[in-house]
Structures are given as structure tokens and as C-alpha cells.
Image (cartoon, grey):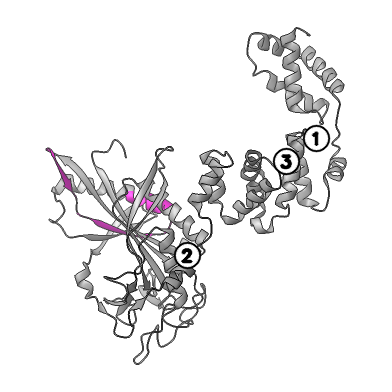
Amino acid sequence: MADAPYKIVIGLEVHVQLSTTSKLFCGCSTEFGAPPNTQVCPVCLGLPGSLPVMNAEAIDIAIRTGMALNCEIASTTKWDRKNYFYPDLPKGYQISQFDQPICGEGYLEFADPENEEATLKVRLIRAHLEEDAGKSMHDEAAGKADSRIDLNRTGTPLLEIVSYPDLRSAAAAKAYLTELRLLLIYLGVSDCNMQEGSLRADANVNLHIESEGSTLATPIVEVKNLNSFRAVERAITYESQRQYAQWQKTGQVMGEAPKQTRGWDDEAGVTVAQREKEESSDYRYFPDPDLVPLKISAEQMKAARSGAELPAAIRRRLEGELGLKAYDADVIVSQGRGVVAYFDTAVKSGASAKRVSSWVQQDVMRTLKEQDWTIEHFPLAAPRLASLLKAIDDGAIDNSRGKEVFQYWLQHPEADLDSAKQALGIASIDRGEIETLCRELLAENPQVVAQVREGNLKGLGSLIGAAKKKNPNADPKLVREMCQQMIESGAV
């Protein structure tokens, strides 16, 4: 809030469920949606005598993610026990990483949502591996107070990505999470489905308030239960306003009140106090005696290095090499790797990048949404679309009739352009026919002629619809140009 009497200071902790088929320290499945407590074993249940075995794939994924986030990758990393009691933590501790995380400091850059010409850079403190806890399910229906525990999620590999408090607005926090999620999806390390819990975010929020020549900082609040990016934005906005109102009442600053954890109530639109926030000393971290430290070799680093083109690089290529506007490049990249590949194939097949961009954003994406298709199952292959767009650029067919061919091809993907044109009654008309048509239009619309002579060209647009009614095959661009030329030359 630019006009607020304070600055919001935000740091985010993002938990990403990694796309391994088995858990972090045992062979149990990580598939979502199984009946409660059916994907468990002595290791993830914490039964006496069971010992953890490291999932090597999770290590590779963590290294790959850390590299993409410009993190320092540790040469040696270790495992620690984070001790706390909670009903969905069967061992009474969580295997995590404390002082030697696998990924050290890094950063993520992304477009400033409040200034389209600026870029924001959020520094990362660390990205460490840990096992997930189970899930508590509370039944608070009338007259009931039951709680059930589903331990299927226990032991699922998580990568916790922790940022410095570099964010200064709720909109920037949402943009950061959007870019981070897109990067993780491009890497293929997670499906980042917030509804299923494979991406979860906590926001640490406080305020810097200018008062009597000095800057005061309010106590930090960690906001949890953020189940969507919109919820993140709403919760931060509400919490900043709540903290300012609280400071006005009490005057308390950092150090005068404990850190607090508050939950976000999305329906009510408020944060609700849950507990005082723990310090690291409360967790009594110590090295896990069942897991030896892990050395990261140069071979592992080389194997984990992603050769895939990532979102930021694709945007730069689409803008720099192909001349797309920043907004258009971002829309295409945001649709995922499949849409980018479709776009690239169409351009390589000879179509104009700007025309492909326009058609992908409008016709292709609209059809995907309406039909609930993925780009991989889209019936119109990219080279076929390119052939249609080249025909439009060459003047063999106008844009509006090209859209009719597009729809026809969706139903008849085997048809060539000539047969599609024949089926739709699309025929070429010569320049003489267009000239005759234009003379008729101008004779029927003297007010347009008068407007154009006065320098107002907007009236020409009304002639296009009239031309199409008289002859559906009339090229709108040629009709407009010829009508304007006739008026300006005094031919009518």
C-alpha cells in the first residue's frame, strides 16, 4: 500500500512436496488420494527398531532446484532431528536440516507487479530437505469434536525454500510465489498443487513504522493456512492493517512481545491467533544418529544440472529474438512448457511470431479452456496452424475467415486448406469486385465519406461489417484501404 503510514516487511517459507514416487526415508508411496493410513510402514510410523534409508532421487531434485534458484550447493550436508510434539508426528521429531542445509543462499528474480518496467530480486536464505508430517482432520460439526489422523503424508519429501524479508507488498509476495511455482513446474520437481498440499506457503509479516524520526518494527507474526496465492495476498493485506491498529493501541515493538503464529480464516477474511511462535532452540535440534552426513560429489552436481530452458530465459528469448511484448511473452510462458513448445514449433514452421502469439493467446487457449483439453491433446498440430497463419499473411485468406478454417479443422483435422475453404464457401474475389463493392458501400454511407474527409477515420470500421454481409469473402483490410483511397482521391 503506497499511501500506508508504514512499510510491510515480508519473508516467505515455501514447502514443496517433491515428485518422487516413494517417501524420503522409506519405500512407501507418495501418491495422493489413497485411503487414510494405507501408505505407511514401520519407518514412517516411527516404530521401535526401524531405520531410515535415504531417497537418492530427492537429493538430486534438491540439487537441481537449488541450482535453478542460484543457490550455493553444500559439499557436505547432514540430517538433524527437530523435536516437537504434535499428534500427526508419530516419531515425536521430524528429520530435517538445521545448520548444514543442502542448498545455501540464492535468489529469485521476477517482474515487479506494480511497475511493469522493473524487476524484483528476493534473496533466499536456504532450501533444505525434510520429511513431511501427517495430516490432522478435525470434525467440528454440531455436537462433535472429533479429530482424526491420516499418516499417509508422513515422510513425504519436502524442500523448504526460505526467503529473506525482502518483499514489501502483498502483490509482490503473490508475484514471487507465482514465479517460484512456475519455475518448479518447469523443472519437473513438483506439481505444485496447493489444493492437494504439494505447495504450501507461510508468511512472516511485520511493519516498519516511521515515528518521531526513527523506524520502529512491530513484532513478527507467522501466518499459516494459506491455501492459494489469493489467500496469501489477502492475508498479508489484512495482517499488516491489523498490526498497525495493534501498534496504535499498545505501542509494542519487536522484542516487547513474543513472535506469534496466526492462522488465516479465508471465509472470514481474518487472521486468528494460534500460539506463540517457537524459536530454533525450542526444537532441540541435534544430528540424527541414524543418518550419516552426505557428501555432494562433482558428478552429482553435473548430473543434476538442468539443461532445460527455464521461464526467465524463455521470456528473454521471446522478447529479444522474436520481438514479442513482455506481456505476451509472459502469458505464453505462464501456460507451461507444452504451450511454449507449441508456439516454438509454429514459428519454426514459418509463421510470424507475433501472429502465432496472438492466435495462441486467443483462439488456442480459449479452445483449450472450453474443451478442457491439454495442449498435448490439441487436435490442431502446430505446423498446421502455421500453414493457416502463413496463408493469412500471404493474403490467400483474410483473418476472420481464417478463424472459420481454424474451427473447421478442429472438427476435421485431416482436411487441407483448399477442402476447408470449399466446405466453408471461401473463395477469392478479384480487385475489380472489391472496387465495385466499395463504391456501393460509400454510396450507401455518405456520413462515413464526410467523416473521413474531415480526418476522422473511425467510420471506416463500420463499412467492414457491411462489406461482409454483402460478400463474406471480402478482405476487410483491402476494403478499408480501398474505401479510404477512393474518398481521399475524390473518386466518390
Q: How many marks?
A: 3
Residue bearing mark 1: 396
Which of 252/175 is in front? Answer: 175
Residue at 44%, 83% in the rendered image: 26
- Where does the image place residue 277, in percent across and percent down from the top left? 23, 64
**Viewer-nearest of discs 2 and 3:** 2
Q: Position of residue 106 (x, y in %)?
A: 35, 58
| Magenta stretch holds residue 235 | yes
Q: Report whether 441 appears left or right of 196.
A: right
Query: Which numbered dot is residue 389?
Result: 3
Query: Circles 2 and 3: CB distance less than 8 Å?
Result: no
- Say which label, 1 or 3, has the lower sequence index: 3
Q: Give the distance between the C-alpha atoms of the residues marked 1 and 3, in whole angstroms.
A: 10 Å
On the image, which quarter does residue 389 sit in?
top right
> Along the horizontal axis of the image, is 338 left or right of 110?
right
Q: Residue at x 77, y 36 (%)?
A: 401
Q: Amino acid at mark 1?
A: Ala
The 10 Å Cα crowd at callout 1, few under 14, some 14 to 19, many 20 or more, is: some
Q: Nearer the viewer, mark 1 or mark 2?
A: 2
> Which is nearer the eye, 378 or 40?
378
Q: Residue furthest top?
A: 490
Q: Is residue 98 left or right of residue 415?
A: left
Res. 17 visible in picture: no
Quadrant of image for the N terminus: top left
First reached walking from the N terminus: tag 1 or tag 2: 2
Quadrant (top left, top right, bottom left, bottom right) of the C terminus = top right
Q: Work out which residue is located at the far bottom of the displayed protein and give it.
A: 49
Image height check: is 443 above or below 469? above
Q: Secondary structure at mark 1?
A: loop
Q: Amino acid at mark 2?
A: Arg
Give the label on residue 305, or none: 2
Range shown magenta: 212-236
